[in-house]
Amino acid sequence: MFILTLVKIVVLITILCALSSYLIEYSVDEIPNITPNASSINSNNFNISSTTEQSGGLHILNAASYPNGPIVLRLIRNGTNNCYEPYLHLRLIYPNIMVYNISTNDANITAIPTFNFCPIATNPPRDLIRIFPLSYNHTMIAFLQNNTSNSPETYEEIGKFIDWNGNVIQELSLGFINFTASDTSSLGTLVVDSSQKYGFIWVNHQRYVSFSYGSNFSIISSHQYQIISTIDGGYCFVMAGFSDAQWVANVVFIRPSYYSTQPSLIYRDTSQAFSMNIETCDKFNTYYEPGLACVFSIKTNSTSNIPARYIKVAFSSNGNVKTPSTLNFNDTTFDADKIYQLWSGGYLLVVRLKNDNILIGYIYDIQGNFSNFWDSPSLPGSLVMLNGVFLNNTVWMFSNAISAIPNASNWTLTTTTAPKFALDHLPDNRHEYRLIKIQPLIRNLTQKFKNNAYSRWDI
């Protein structure tokens, strides 16, 4: 079978071993440079807390969250030659505003090639270093290094697995890519399995003129895709774009046995649309009813005064589709930063108003009808860098703040709670918020990493 495509997808699956955890107490002198301040605003519905870093020039770059916390926050300081300081400033933030430093003085971390710290052409700005939370005491740092092998690609993607103490547990090659600063689509992404215990899938792009691979699937280079972890331990690729004079969305399932299914069509639109985007997909099986669901936006005109159509498509792991439904999102007055499917039903739209760039949240019920605004105060959109939602409907947002203390840096965490439209159904593997020390088990974990079998597909 021959498939003409411009994209080769490399999929790496590996297993991350779950370890026993040990609760420890941290003394204040272990984190001398971080001072959580008293909350400037605190109500029943939202909380704003400011934190002071006793080091000047630090500001927020990105953050990544475990499903119900904590959050791994990365801070940066501008360096020379318009690149960021070649050092990883990582913080572990708990929902109760406890802040801890993740030490990154390990020689294996400081040896990350310095070109990874230079900003690339994205909005908002970012560099080549990506942080991926794994199990509840492990994180992976992904970056590039120059390719010294015989493969034709210019860079090799590397993953460093660290614990919350900053110890490097293992380093793993994640595949080879071609990369330019103006095209970041080849950079890999990671999705943890649905249990957040056992493994992850890693996907990156390699560009080819033509490619064939048995009966497996291909992704057209102009199409978007997202990956969902399924409850059986497998994964689902959702792909959307223009094909054969229509806008289509297809899904392919990768089973726990590493078998990939044939593509299943879950949605098609034959209108004269301008664009089709994947806005959100259910990545943690958190939807209030069984099955999977995605929300697609279809823009029929490039002008901002004509709203996009937002379509919810629910489907099962065998490719069967329920009747698509239209959500009553009217985006003529705002630009949506992010759409979240809430654990207990409904949707949260984090938006910036077009007239003044104020960032607010719109909450919609299960049927997609407007319910209310979030309880957080409106925030200047230019200051808000990052946001996310925990499984308990807690919304979190980070923003930079001006420090009144010389040679210090301030940042702010705002949290609010979205309403619940269905009964809670918390997962069996939920974890309490606590600090984990796993140093005594590093040797055991390293051995398990070395003995793991993993599979890579060229799709």
Image (spheres, rainbow, N blue to C red):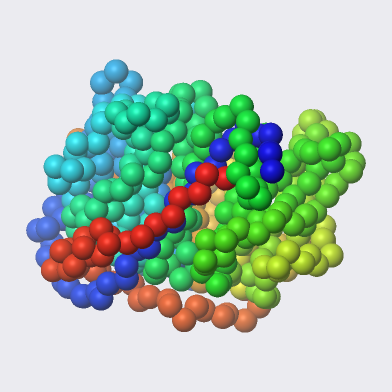
- The percent position of residue 328, horizontal first and vertical second, equals 80, 56
- Does residue 421 appear anywhere in the picture? no
- The percent position of residue 408, horizontal first and vertical second, equals 22, 39
Q: How many marks?
A: 0
- The percent position of residue 219, horizontal first and vertical second, equals 64, 42
Q: Nearer the viewer, residue 145 or 53?
A: 145
- The percent position of residue 259, horizontal first and vertical second, equals 57, 61
Residue at (78, 46) in percent of width and height: 248
Q: Nearer the viewer, residue 325 or 169?
A: 169
Q: Is residue 255 above or below residue 51?
A: below
Residue at (73, 41) in percent of width and height: 241
Residue at (69, 63) in percent of width and height: 293
Q: Is residue 366 left or right of residue 186?
A: right
Taking the view exactly as shown, the residue that stands out farthest to the left is 29
Q: Is residue 197 left or right of residue 365?
A: left
**Picture quadrant of residue 96:** bottom left
Q: Is residue 34 above or below residue 154?
A: below
- Does residue 379 appear anywhere in the picture? yes
**Picture quadrant of residue 290:** bottom right
Name the quarter where the C terminus is drawn. top right
Residue at (65, 56) in percent of width and height: 252
